Image: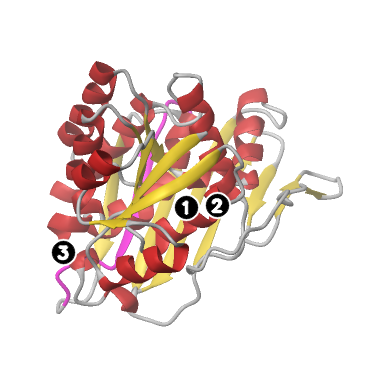
Amino acid sequence: MLRIGIVGAGGMGTVHRSNYAYMKDCQVMAVVGRTKQDEERAAEWGLPLYDDIDSMLNQEEIDVVDVCTPTFLHKEHVIKSLSRGKHVITEKPIALSASDAKEMFDLAREKGVQLLVGQVLRFYRESQILKQLVEDQRYGKVLDATFERLSACPRWAQGGWLFDKSKSGHLPFDLHIHDLDLMVSLFGKPEEFQFTSCGNNNKDYREQYRFFYRYQDFHVVAEAAWFNADIPFTARWRVYFEHAVVINDGTRLVAYQFDREPLVFDTEERIKIPTGINVPPTGVYLEELEHFTECIRNCRPSERIKEDEIMTVIEILEQISKE
């Protein structure tokens, strides 16, 4: 039985706690938090609430600390947990700088524990199928790819930490990170990249980005936006192979070939668990946490979300953030 301590009982903390309830070999033991929401959630779940990680670890038998706090608190909470010899699962992004991320991974190695980062997009069936198509070249080599992740400006966060660049990294670290992480997992590190951005002059952040990534034999274009408009959330991609175009339009995954019937892939999940956030019921968080806890039990790093890939993503985002 793995004993879990959740740090931060907001949206993602609630998602993780709900999914641990489906895992018979895991038990959430306590919550760390200082907000009214943390207090209410801990009471609702019947769990003790602590003001800080040290207090929890001094009082509870904990194997894994699950960090679900805002981005700017990740380093503090991860370092403190690793220093106490605890395995750590942390939400994305692991950090806003490559140096901070490296410090955390180095400490995990020194302590002989696992540090696992929740890049959840990799656990979607669509992503897994695409990775298989890229690797086995079922439709030939990749010729071009396009990724798109568009949203209305997150009103729920107005005036909060998400709009403070020093705390969130703004749109690149919060939104584009998903597609960039998937791209790196599929194609590796790009040889070079460029980007353009735009936005209203009265905003202290850029509202829309277009990214251009060059690989040896093909290019990838990506778009990410927090539009000043009430558009529905959109996340989709298109990959052009030598012998097919594979499209994920957000509702289904289809391969189109010349002079053949389209192939609709089976992307149905084995289970759908309500999230309580702006994500439809899904089993991806369960699959992610099951994978992470398996890594912890086997005392091995994740082969699905590798340290070097995470570092590549953070390095690129850090460069974008500085320009």
Q: Which residues are magenta?
A: 203-217
How packed mark 2 is, by other alpha carbons closer than 10 Å (few <14, some 14-19, many 20 or more), is many
Depth check, front residue: 31 or 112: 31
Q: Are marks 2 and 1 in contact (CB under 8 Å)?
A: yes
Report, in whole angstroms, how far the alpha carbon at label 1 lies from the one at label 3. 25 Å
Residue receiving disc 1: 16
Write down the residue under mark 2: 19
| Residue 24 showing in the rendered view | yes
Residue 32 vs residue 243, the one in the foreground: 32
Disc 1 and disc 3 in contact, CB within 8 angstroms: no
Q: What residue type is disc 2 on?
A: Asn
Instruction: Give the percent coordinates (x, y) of residue 112.
Output: 31, 18
- Label 3 to label 2: alpha-carbon separation: 30 Å
Task: Determine whether, in the image, residue 280 is placed left or right of residue 108.
Answer: right
Query: Does residue 303 sit above or below 177 in this rendering?
Result: above
Residue at the spot 42% in from the left edge and 34% down from the top edge: 184
Tell me the quarter of the picture where residue 110 sits: top left
Among the two numbered marks 1 and 3 on one chain, the one whose residue lies closer to the N terminus: 1
The disc, 3 or 2, on the residue closer to the chain's N-terminal end is 2
269 vs 19, nearest the viewer? 19
Check disc 1 and report its element: helix, strand or loop.
Answer: helix
Which residue is located at x 17 percent, y 57 percent? 167
- Mark 1 crowd level (few <14, some 14–19, many ≥20, 10 Å Cα): many
Q: Is residue 234 magenta?
A: no
> Can I make out residue 186 in this image?
no
Q: Quadrant of residue 87?
A: top left
| Residue with the most extreme bottom position | 230
Q: Residue at x 14, y 79 (%)?
A: 202
**x, y percent for residue 230:** 42, 82
Foreground: disc 1 or disc 3? 1
Label 3 sits on residue? 164
